[in-house]
Amino acid sequence: LSLMPVWAFMYVRAVTEPPEVVEGPLGTGAEIYSNCASCHGAAGGGGVGYPFEGGSVEATFPHIEDQIRYVYYGTEGFNAAGIEIYGNPDRPGGPHVTGARGVMPAFASQLTQYEIIAVVCHERYTLGGADPTSEEWAAEYEAWCAPDAPIYDAVETGEYDYTSPDAEAIGDVEIIPVGPEAVAGSPAG
């Protein structure tokens, strides 16, 4: 009888499904996101920094490359380049002004290029709600954020440097160059 609590504990552990382990960029991004949660909220609901949820991040950055660039260079990089608006200049509800909600740190020296892709994928697809099966987001997801995404793989293995001024398409995937310095974002389309 004294072993009953131990037996019950072991039984529950045996029949409990293990948590799903997410592979690839989304799994890596979820682990890294703790660096972002203090400003953007644990679930991406915002705080000092803008929220990601409800499609807000996709409205601000309709192209993943623009979001990667902003995470890479941060507010300081955009201010140094004289860029007042980051992301989509035609954003519904108005564009985001560089530094308007505080300082976004540059993560270029804190994270690798593939870690930046991973956390951006997590922000867009896990927190932001972009549907990776939708016509609007499927191509981006497959190229950048899927477990076998060719761009993520090429950056992770060192075959591709998205800050290179000579960065080109990978296979048949066209890429908006992130570039060696901050540049203005691109409108949707």
Image (spheres, rainbow, N blue to C red):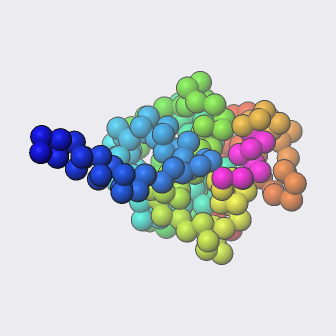
At x 51%, y 50%, the residue is: 21
On whether residue 2 falls in the magenta region, the answer is no
Q: Residue at x 58, y 30 (%)?
A: 111
> Residue at the top extreme?
109
Q: In the rendered view, would you say 162 is above or below 86? A: above
Question: As rendered, which of 181 and 121 lies closer to the eye?
Answer: 121
Q: Which residues are magenta?
A: 147-155
Residue at 78% across, 42% down: 154
Q: Is residue 180 above or below residue 90?
A: above
Where residue 178 appears, as percent x and y from the top left, is 71, 43
Q: Where does the N terminus fall, quadrant-wise?
A: top left
Tally of numbered tags: 0
Q: Position of residue 27 (x, y in %)?
A: 54, 47
Asked whether the viewer can see residue 179, the reply is: no
Give the residue at x 59% y 24%: 109
In the picture as drawn, the residue positioned furthest to the front comes out as 1
Foreground pick, 151 / 185: 151
Residue 154: say if magenta. Answer: yes
Decide if residue 15 is on the left or right side of residue 64: left
Residue 115, image quadrant: top right
Residue 41 placed where, x, y %? Answer: 34, 46
